[in-house]
Image (cartoon, grey):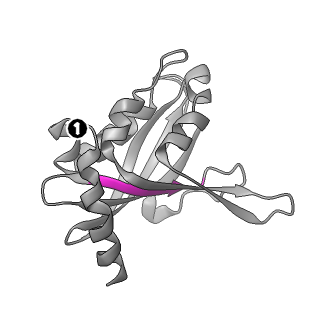
Amino acid sequence: MRALLALALLLPAASAQPSADPADVSTIDGIIAAYYEVVSGPAGQPRDWARDSTLHHPAALILIPGTGADGETTLQATDLAGFHAQSNSLVEAGFFEHEIARRTERHGAVAHVWSTYAWRQTEDGPVGGQGVNSIQLAHDGSRWWIVSWMFDGRADAPPVPEPYLPE
């Protein structure tokens, strides 16, 4: 019930959002493909943060785990603009992230996507690592929105568990 109330409060604000490409937001497959495309690119190439903004609800939340000085897990919360500002190092180094497996759970207008990814510094280079993006989506009756996401990108994060690896 609380989730439905929160969804109802968030979705009307979406009308102020710039228009998205319908191919990006009409299906879960489309929005997840676009999610990976906007963050990927060679060194020196600016990322398409404007397109990324059309995928995310204006009130979207991003949580990124870290490791504190005492080894405890910390959480950094930010909005999409904060994530974009922190992610400019991706442009300097080159970064290509692509989905290698997915588990989707959906109930009505709400979907949770567990998206396993591999990343590289060059498009065809060696895999630099793997992880799992936890992406929460909402459908407002006409399109999908990314409302939140997180991943455990810490250097000491555990390996991807078998249920999330490709079959």
Quadrant in the picture for the C terminus = bottom left
* Residue in the foreground of this view, choosing between 9 and 143: 9
Furthest residue in direction left, as rendered = 142
Most common SS among magenta residues: strand
For badge 1, the amino acid type reads Ala
- Looking at the rendered structure, the secondary structure element under dot 1 is loop
Residue 23's spot in the image, x, y percent? 17, 38
Q: Could you tell me if residue 165 is visible in this image?
A: no
Identify the residue at the far bottom of this view: 1
Is residue 94 left or right of 103 when viewed as pictured?
A: right
Q: How many marks?
A: 1
Q: Is residue 57 left or right of residue 62?
A: left
The residue at the point 21 percent across, 60 percent down is 139
- Spot occupied by residue 112 in the image (x, y as percentages of width and height): 35, 64
Residue at the location (37% across, 37% down)? 52
Mark 1 highlights which residue? 20
Residue 30: name its quadrant.
top left
Is 48 above or below relative to 130? above
Q: Is residue 4 among what the camera can see?
A: yes
List the single residue furthest toward the right. Answer: 70
| Quarter holding residue 77 | bottom right
State the quadrant of the N terminus: bottom left
Q: Position of residue 62 (x, y in %)?
A: 51, 54
Residue drawn at the location 23% of the way across and 53% of the way down: 144
Find the magenta span and give its range.
145-152
In the depicted structure, whether residue 30 falls above or below residue 114: above
Q: Around disc 1, counting alpha carbons within 10 Å, would you say few (fewer than 14), some (14 to 19), or many (20 or more)?
A: some
Q: Position of residue 163 (x, y in %)?
A: 44, 65
Is 164 colored magenta in this rendering? no
